[in-house]
Each structure stands twice: as structure tokens, then as C-alpha cells.
Image (spheres, rainbow, N blue to C red):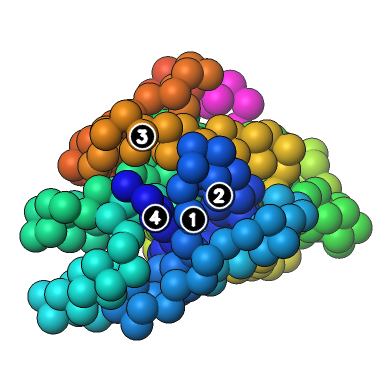
Amino acid sequence: MKNIAVFTSGGDSPGMNPCLRAVYKAGVNFGFEVYGIMGGYEGIIDGDFVLLNEEKVWGISSRGGTILRSARSDRFRTKEGRAKAYQNLKKANIDAIIAIGGDGTFTGATVFMNEYPDIKMVGCPGTIDNDLVGTDFTIGYDTAINTVVEAVDKIRDTANSHNRLFFVEVMGRDAGLIALRAGISAEADAILVPELTGEPNQLIDLLRTKENKQTSYIVVVAEGDERGGAKAVAEKIKKELPQFDTKITILGHIQRGGSPTAMERFRAAWMGAEAVKALMENVHGVMIGIVDNKIKRTPFSKAIKHHNSINADMVDIMQLLSVVM
Ligand code: F6P
């Protein structure tokens, strides 16, 4: 191995920059030339490679998003797309790649490595959703839940002033980990997650009994919630309790932006450097994660197949603090 490359793929997440910077720093220290691939898998197909240097990665840890840009690539799902990607990598003498992304990224990596086994790939978990097994925290999750908490705190100010009931929808695709951790931290009255399927009646009872005792109520709803997300849940509740002044806020993509928290940067940098170390040890086809404050290497197949789901014991205890359903 002489040249290695790094790219970011799928939904961008805060912390991707410190991760790719760490790949560069560790790579150079191990004696490699380190290339950045622009725009995820699309950039491999287009041969959009940039030789990284100190200047390019200097000071990027505080920046959200990704300097390498990101994409969800349809072309890489095709055999022709992957064949083109392989030719470009060979031309540039790149045979080892670090992919920073989520399960879609690692699914693509697995298919590619099966077709072209001379390309070695290692992954770092980059997604705000925290839905990958093999790591306690994905890159972006900590910053995203801090953003949600800050937003809900602000919503509460206006909710209190007007005695309102707010439904706040958060991201997470089909995982409720953003909703649960941010909801508890922001003192949400109720948290709706896709992993649980209780009837909204529980929420209606809560609001009925609490009526007039509290000035405002906050319900955090995960976007993947099977009861239909914030809008659908709010409509159901409004029918039962028309006396409530109900509002809906969909936080959307602000959850993906912003300067990464200190822990985010640290974990991202640690995983980035460890990814290069794994390549040095000829270990590939794995995602680097942190479990119990130790580095763990999980085969892509496992990281993709099993979703990191909400811990049932945690939910039980959280029920003492908020209605989690
Ligand atoms: O996977 C990260 C994520 O932000 C999800 O939480 C969300 O459902 C999705 O990406 C949104 O994707 P896009 O930016 O393509 O709309």
C-alpha cells in the first residue's frame, strides 16, 4: 500500500471532518499519500480525487458538514458504476479506502470488496442516527442530540408563554435513539419512538390528568414513528383534546449541521486513526467503533444487518421520568 483514500458518504454528520483529518494525519505518519475522494461513491466513479495536505485539513475539526462533500450514489448500485470506480482507483494506485458513513455506505463497500477483493476498505460510523451495531456512538449523534436539546429548550420558552402543547419531530430514520436521549435531556413530557408501539391513548391520559397543572407540554416524536410522525400524532390528540393549543415543529436538517461537540471530535479522531491502523494490520471489511471506551472492529456484514436499538432496561427506567412509547 502506497496510497490510501478517504471519503464521506450518505447523510453528512458533524464530526466527519475531524475523522477524515485523523485519517490524513495517521496515514501520513505511517508513510502514505492520502487522497480525499469528493462526493462519496460518486467521486470514485468520476475519479474526483484530491491529494490531501496539511493546509487542506488544517482547522477543519470545528466545522460541521464534510469538506469532502457527500452523496447517496445510485450509480454505485450498478455493476457498470462499480467497474468504473475500480478502474479509477487502479489508475490512481489506490487500493485501500476508509469510508465514513452509515449502513448504506457499508453495504456498498461490501458489494464492492466482493467484486474487487484487491481493494481493501475499512469504515468509520458516520451518521447522526446512532443506529449501527458495533459502536456506542456514531459520529454526529452527540452533536445532533445537543442541537435537539437546545432547540427544545427554546421551544419550551415560547410554549410556556402561551400555554401550548408542542409536538417536536426529530430525525433518526427508523431508530428512536435521537428522540429518546434528547427527549429525556430536554425534559420532554412524552417521547414517541419507532421501537415501541403503545397507543397514543397513553399520551391522551397523561395530558388529561396533567391538564392545568403545567403551563406547557412537549412531546418529542421520532420521524420514523409508526403512529405517523408529529403531524399525525398531533392531529389525533387534537381530536381528543381540542382545548389544547397545539403546535408542531419539525426540526429537520438543522440536526445535521453545526460545530461538532468536543466528545464528537475526540471520538471521530480516535476512530479515524484506528481505521488507518487496521489497514496497516491488513484488517479490512470492518467498521471501527467504540464500545465501553474501547475500540471494536465489527465486520461490515454485522454492522449493517443488526440495528442498534433502544435498550429495554433504559426504557423502563426512563418511564419514571417521561412517557416513553
Ligand atoms: O441518516 C441520517 C438522516 O439525517 C436521517 O435521520 C434522515 O431520515 C435522513 O438522513 C434524511 O436524509 P436526506 O438528507 O437525504 O433527506
| Vertical comparison of 168 with 316: above or below | below
> What are the residue bounds of the magenta stretch?
318-323
| Vertical comparison of 133 with 170: above or below | above
Label 3 amino acid?
Answer: Met
Query: Of marks 3 and 4, which one's residue comes earlier in the chain?
Result: 4
CA gap between label 4 and label 2 equals: 11 Å
Query: What residue is pinned by disc 1?
Result: 34
Q: Would residue 226 be counted in the magenta stretch?
A: no
Q: Residues within 10 Å of mark 4 (few under 14, many from 20)?
A: some
Q: Residues within 10 Å of mark 3 (few under 14, many from 20)?
A: some
**Residue lying at 15% horizontally and 75% vertically, measured from the top left:** 83
User: Residue 280, labelled with which disc?
Assistant: 3
> Is most of the magenta stretch helix, strand or loop?
loop
Query: Which image quadrant: the C terminus?
Result: top left
**Residue lying at 43% horizontally and 39% vertically, measured from the top left:** 276
**Residue lying at 46% horizontally and 32% vertically, measured from the top left:** 274
Instruction: Tell me, yes or no, whether the two marked residues, 1 and 2, touch with CB atoms within 8 Å.
Output: yes
CA gap between label 1 and label 2 equals: 6 Å
Tell me if I can see residue 140 in this picture.
no
Label 1 amino acid?
Answer: Val
Name the quadrant containing residue 210: top right
Kindly state the secondary structure of the residue where label 2 is placed: helix
Query: What residue is pinned by disc 2?
Result: 24
Query: Of marks 1 and 4, which one's residue comes earlier in the chain?
Result: 4
